[in-house]
């Protein structure tokens, strides 16, 4: 016969079990013992959040396939459920991922924290919202993510501080590569099909000859003005540019023809993705793209 547990003790055990499921936060919310639920609109932000939160976070990234054109994204039920359960949501903002705002509006929450990379970034370029290509912008965004994690989970503030320092240190190789390339290739004329590539080109110090209206139109998924197409094709035919960089995810008839013309003219063609490849972290991804630029410049 099993011994009886006194009623008061039994109730205390139940209460203790219930309390053990949650940890209080400074903001008044309760964080599950399973970790802080983070939803990132794009997987590069998700990867950064995972590095900063470690075992204390559960990260879901919505846009994660480098082969998919982000212009064609359509939200689904799984995405909506993830956002509804999120403690922290990270999006780029600046008009890049407005669909995330629609998902957030569908499941309002006073306790959920929203961070927008574009709003946080200190080094925004005009008419180019892809701030994740700038290392200083990303470091500022990482700082904001860490401060939010500390607020949601103050007990582990020291843990998050250490993770942030590790992340900052890991950006050193990227900064060194940019500095080296800037010293060697500053002022080199290049062609870019999209404004997303402006951040990297500016960091390296490259001189972009492609008309801005051409880049902007391609970035927005529309046809560039005919005069700008003629100007870009002329730059290729006359070999006025050292390389042509394009996004693998937004190839159009115009940019595909431009690539063919560049190859025929002996101009290196550099592919760049807007989404993090699954086998890389953020730092190695940016470093690998810089190295592709470097190899093309050396040709």
Image (spheres, grey):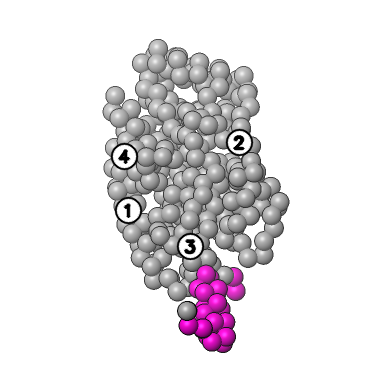
Q: Earlier in the sequence, mark 1 or mark 2?
A: 2
Mark earlier in primary sequence (3, 2) = 3
Per the image, the residue denoted by label 3 is: 34
Q: Quadrant of residue 269?
A: top left
Query: In what element is the residue under mark 1?
Result: helix
Give the number of the disc on residue 73.
2
Kindly report the distance in space between the C-alpha atoms of the residues bearing marks 3 and 1.
27 Å
Highlighted range, magenta? 3-29
Q: Give how far apart the Cα atoms at labels 4 and 1 are.
A: 18 Å
Q: CA distance from mark 3 to mark 4?
A: 44 Å
Task: Identify the residue at horizontal 61%, vertical 32% (top origin).
Answer: 72
Front position in the image: 157 or 37: 37
Disc 4: which residue: 181
The residue nearer to you, when weighing 198 against 165, is 165
Nearer the observer, disc 1 or disc 2? 2
Q: Earlier in the sequence, mark 4 or mark 1?
A: 1
- The residue shown at (49%, 36%) is 65
Mark 3 vs mark 4: which is more N-terminal?
Answer: 3
Q: Residues within 10 Å of mark 4 (few under 14, many from 20)?
A: many
Extreme residue toward the top, this view: 264
The residue beneath circle 1 is: 170
Residue 136 placed where, x, y %?
43, 53
Q: Is residue 209 above or below residue 123?
A: above
Coordinates of residue 63 in the picture (x, y in percent)? 53, 41
């Amino acid at each position: 016969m099993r011994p009886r547990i006194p009623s008061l003790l039994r109730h205390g055990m139940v209460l203790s079990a219930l309390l053990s499921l949650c940890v209080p936060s400074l903001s008044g919310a309760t964080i599950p013992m399973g970790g802080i639920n983070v939803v990132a609109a794009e997987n590069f932000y998700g990867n950064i959040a995972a590095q900063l939160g470690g075992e204390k976070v559960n990260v879901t990234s919505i846009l994660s396939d480098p082969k998919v054109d982000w212009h064609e994204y359509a939200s689904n039920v799984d995405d909506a459920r993830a956002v509804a359960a999120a403690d922290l949501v990270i999006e780029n903002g600046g008009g890049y991922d407005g669909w995330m705002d629609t998902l957030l509006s569908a499941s309002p929450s006073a306790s959920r924290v929203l961070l927008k990379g574009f709003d946080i970034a200190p080094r925004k370029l005009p008419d180019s919202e892809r701030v994740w290509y700038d290392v200083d912008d990303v470091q500022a965004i990482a700082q904001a993510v860490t401060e939010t994690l500390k607020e949601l989970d103050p007990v582990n503030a020291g843990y998050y501080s250490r993770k942030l320092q590790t992340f900052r240190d890991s950006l050193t190789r990227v900064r060194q590569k940019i500095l080296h390339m800037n010293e060697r290739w500053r002022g080199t004329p290049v062609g870019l099909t999209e404004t997303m590539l402006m951040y990297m080109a500016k960091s390296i110090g490259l001189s972009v000859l492609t008309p801005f209206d051409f880049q902007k139109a391609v970035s927005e998924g529309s046809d560039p003005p005919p005069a700008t197409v003629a100007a870009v094709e002329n730059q290729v035919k006359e070999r006025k540019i050292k390389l042509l960089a394009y996004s693998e995810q937004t190839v159009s008839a115009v940019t595909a023809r431009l690539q063919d013309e560049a190859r025929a003219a002996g101009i290196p063609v550099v592919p760049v993705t807007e989404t993090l490849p699954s086998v890389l972290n953020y730092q190695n991804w940016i470093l690998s793209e810089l190295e592709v630029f470097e190899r093309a410049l050396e040709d």
